[in-house]
Amino acid sequence: MPLTLSRLCQGIAPSLTLAIDARAKEMKEKGEDVIGFGAGEPDFDTPLHIREAAAYALEHGKTRYTPVGGTLELRRAICDKFKSDNGLTYAPKQIIASNGAKHSLFNAFQAILNPGDEVLIPTPWWVSYPELVRMAGGVPVPVPTTEADGFVATAQMLAPHITPRTKALVLNSPNNPNGSVWSREQLADIAALAIERGFYVISDEIYEKLIYDGQRHVSIASLGKEIKEQTVVINGVSKAYAMTGWRIGYAAGPTAIIDAMMNYQSHATSNPNSVAQYAAIAALQGDQAPLHKMLATLDERRKALAAALNCRLPKGAFYVMLNIGGALGKRHNGHVINGSMDFAAALLDAKKVAAVPGIAFEAEGYMRLSYTLPMEKQQEGVRRIAEFMAELE
């Protein structure tokens, strides 16, 4: 038998967001003055009380295996969070903690998908959604939205893409990469559609607490008993608490699905990091002042970046989508800008500014920029982008 790689593994595309970030970091290590708008992580330190909880766990021997889905204490803390923040009642057996929200998504797709099952994913989409679906044997079905729509896929836009093979919808509000937020009314229409046509909703709410302009996050699972029974809610501590490297995500949903995810995880990874679990409890139950301080800073940067780039003001998360349609077909230093990949490469080479090409999100003609840089760095990055645009021929 030929010694080859699996067809499944060969069919999975690498993450362009991580690739851009890795190249930017490599350039920085060589001493180059790179400004990176690529990474999807806050630039704040993990709050002190969370770090202290981890240190306490280390000093008191909390370093052994835990239950596969996380300690009972953590799962109870997650239940309390859902009750207080979202009006959702779950029992600890309906909660699983995993190695980051991405791992929770992976487990969820493995639990519900059979080969050929279709999953609706509004575009622009986060780069990992279609690959996670493919890794479970499913078929990602893009549902295009436009900037004129606010990048929000409504029930009316989703309906034509439903087929007898439709198994689930991925809903990400607030959204990566465009910062859009679905309203209660829009979510209610989608819930009614899911109930009528019989498909699951995988609701990725990792940016739940990063929301602006007085808006309130609404979890689709909170809109009634029926939709709750068809929804797996994904969340974690990475974004809101500046804990991206701690790798604690979690999911809540119907007992049968969570049991399946638990069984899968028991063989794939076992429990998530024990010390990080205790840190996550402190994040969920402790002082929320650092979160509010971070949110105020992100809000200031959001407004400044959107105004400076003359692009749509996002309502959540920490990303803007820069429309580069006017740059396409032009040249920079003799190189033609035929698409967002060309734009990203030329911008990084010429001006040492890293941003993620829109093609990674099924959004050709756009770039995604994260406002997770100190204001002075952000302003310098904007200056370089403006300089780059002015040099286009």
Image (tube, helix red, strand yellow):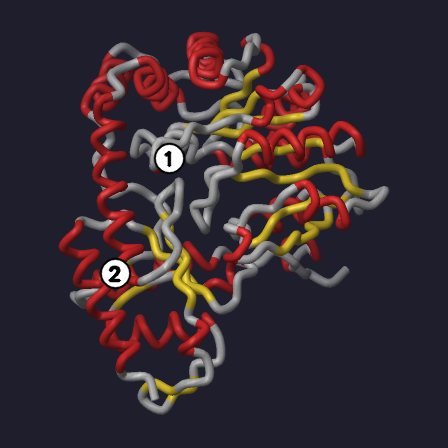
> Quick one: quadrant of the C terminus?
bottom left
Q: Position of residue 180 (x, y in %)?
A: 47, 44
- Toward the bottom, the furthest residue is 334
Asked whether residue 246 appears in the rendered view, the answer is no
Q: Say which of 74 and 142 sits in front.
A: 142
What residue is at 45 percent from the left and 50 percent from the top? 178
Q: Residues under labels 2 and 1: Cα distance?
A: 20 Å
Specify the amino acid type for callout 2. Ala
The secondary structure type at the circle numbered 2 is helix
Is residue 43 toward the left or the right of residue 343 in the image? left
Does residue 2 appear in this view? yes
Residue 169 placement: quadrant: top right
Name above or below for residue 140 compared with residue 190.
below
The front one of 152 and 210 is 152
| 36 to the left or right of 252 | left
Which residue is label 1 attached to?
Answer: 211
Q: Position of residue 7 (x, y in %)?
A: 70, 57
Measured as percent of width and height from the top left, residue 358 is found at 48, 62
Q: Nearer the viewer, residue 336 or 196?
A: 196
> Which label was assigned to residue 308?
2
Q: Is residue 39 left or right of residue 386?
A: right
Q: Position of residue 310 (x, y in %)?
A: 32, 62
